[in-house]
Image: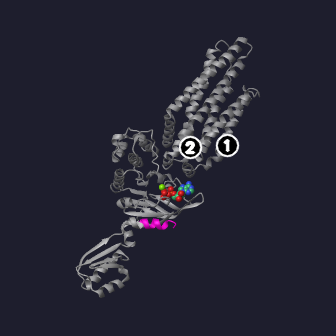
Amino acid sequence: MVEHSITVDNIEKSLQGRDILKGVSFSVRQGEVFGFLGPNGAGKTTTIRILLGLYSPDAGRASIMGADVTTDQARQRVGFVLDDDGLYDGASAKENLAYFARIYQQPVDDERITQVLRLVDLEGRADSKAGTFSRGMRQRLALARALVHDPDVLILDEPTSGIDPSAQIEIRELMVDIAHDRNKAVMLSSHNMDEVQKICARIAVLDRGEVVLSGSLAELRETMGSGMVTVRTSEPIPADLYEEIKSTAEFGLQDSSENLLHFSPSSAGTTPDIVAALARRGARIEEVTRNEASLEEMYTSIVREGQPA
Amino acid sequence: MSGLRAIIGANLRNILQSGALVMVFAGIAVICAAVVAVIAGSFIFSPAVEDGDTTATELGNYLGLISYATTVIITGASFTVLFTVPLLREKTRGTLESLLATPVSVRQVWTARSVALFVPGAVIGGVLGLGMMLFLMTAYLSDVDVVVNGYLVVATFVVVPLIYLALSALMHLVGLLGRVTSGNVIAVIFLPGFSSVMLRLAGRAGVDVESWPFLTINIACGLVLFMLIMIFRHKLTKERIVLSCHS
Ligand SMILES: Nc1ncnc2c1ncn2[C@@H]1O[C@H](COP(=O)(O)OP(=O)(O)O)[C@@H](O)[C@H]1O
Ligand SMILES: [Mg+2]
């Protein structure tokens, strides 16, 4: 049996009479970076608050490492960075970490603290006050704080928002390292498909309180159609072959010019069939190119569809 | 338990980190207490000692009431000064929300904050109340008999601190669930209300300060605060606190 690190099962939540989450389900596995994607106001932060026991769900269940999210047991095994980093400006990097270590009932040993500071590359700033840090450094310190009790699961609410691109890259690399090298489950929320595509293998897309899409990125590309396929032949194909190809709906022939054929097949699995059909009738194929539909486009269309006209 | 201690420690540090604030407050409190002590010494105790017709018990009662008033006013004033800024900061900067996402309970956070507000004020108030008494006794009453009233001493150094601990808890209950300023309003109303009522009772209304009545009224006041806390404490949930942080 695959034990998921985070399981969210049909969570509903309304706040002040508004339905914010309408039956959200997804799961996150150990050792993966999971992208929790959605436009602003989709309900990402609300879901994360439920996972951290800050809100109680109206219906549904959620668990972390098998423990219900309403229990301290679950909270002991999860590290987090919320959208406000929640660092004490007046305290040093080290003091911020020591405080959380104490709260998690960890022995406050310097070695452990130095170790997590080294991981986020802030070793040299251990005694500087958090208030003097740049936003990127603060995010890294918050990440270190989230790791201080060696949790199995990390939940990060838009960890790269509002920081400069090079700092974003550092944070992304850290998240991947933490998931892969330390075999932790990392769930990050984001409104940026591009970012999620860079580091996540699996995602869930949330839109107005509903998961509208979830699964592995590879699978999603498959089911969403594979974008354009272009076939180049050494000479223009005969008219009868052209008609035959055109009449096969699943090939999705869009247009052609000279020796180029542009297809928009109904699924990625269709491409070999197109090639086979052409080859069988003697067409000399020089090149087949596939422009994968970028998930960015897919996401943008989902988000745009969601918007009132 | 070590979690609770960590939060109390952090909250205390947080309040003391408004270091300037605490020092300024303590400084002003000392100056005010000193002025009151000199005035009371010169205009009440010196004449009374010279006249010679004030009894040792009466002198003790005056002494006790002055020290009582000092403790009540200074501790109360510390609440109005030290409550709002640190709590508001924690609610708006997300430090409180992050804390609540750890395995601490709302009760622990509430307790820790209440204790952390209470301690500096109670220490400064208690020390100055006691200091006032000792100063007046050595400076003005060293040559006469004074019977210090045990009931007043208990009221000042046991019951008043308990009242303020309850008040701090009530202020935090309100401040955590709703607006921080609403919590502060409690202190702002309580301090002048409580001190003027008590002193009027002990003075003109003549409630007996030498035996149990005055002490009992103080205890009753503490119980009222305690009951209010008991009635409303079940409202305290992480969800309500987080929602109030973002509204
Ligand atoms: N306290 C609240 N009362 C009512 N609505 C709220 C409250 N907090 C958030 N919302 C609404 O819930 C929706 C989801 O918010 P949120 O979870 O913060 O979204 P995200 O993090 O995806 O941007 C938004 O439309 C927001 O306006
Ligand atoms: Mg959000």
* Region of the chain picked out in magenta, as a range: A299-309
Q: Residue at x 58, y 27 (%)?
A: B29
Q: Residue furthest right?
A: B205
Q: Quadrant of the N terminus of chain A?
A: bottom left
Residue linked to disc 2: B110
> Which disc number belongs to residue B227?
1
Residue B192 is a magenta residue? no
Q: Earlier in the sequence, mark 1 or mark 2?
A: 2
Residue A25 location in percent, x, y? 48, 64
Q: Amino acid at mark 2?
A: Trp
Horizontal and vertical percent for residue B72?
Answer: 64, 30
Please rate how many residues cluster around mark 1, counting C-alpha atoms within 10 Å: few if below 14, some from 14 to 19, many from 20: few
**Nearest the eye: B138 or B43:** B43
Q: Position of residue B76 (x, y in %)?
A: 62, 33
In percent of width and height, residue A80 lies at 44, 51
Write down the quadrant of residue B168 in the picture: top right
Mark 2 CB in 8 Å range of ligand 1? no
Specify the amino acid type for callout 1.
Met
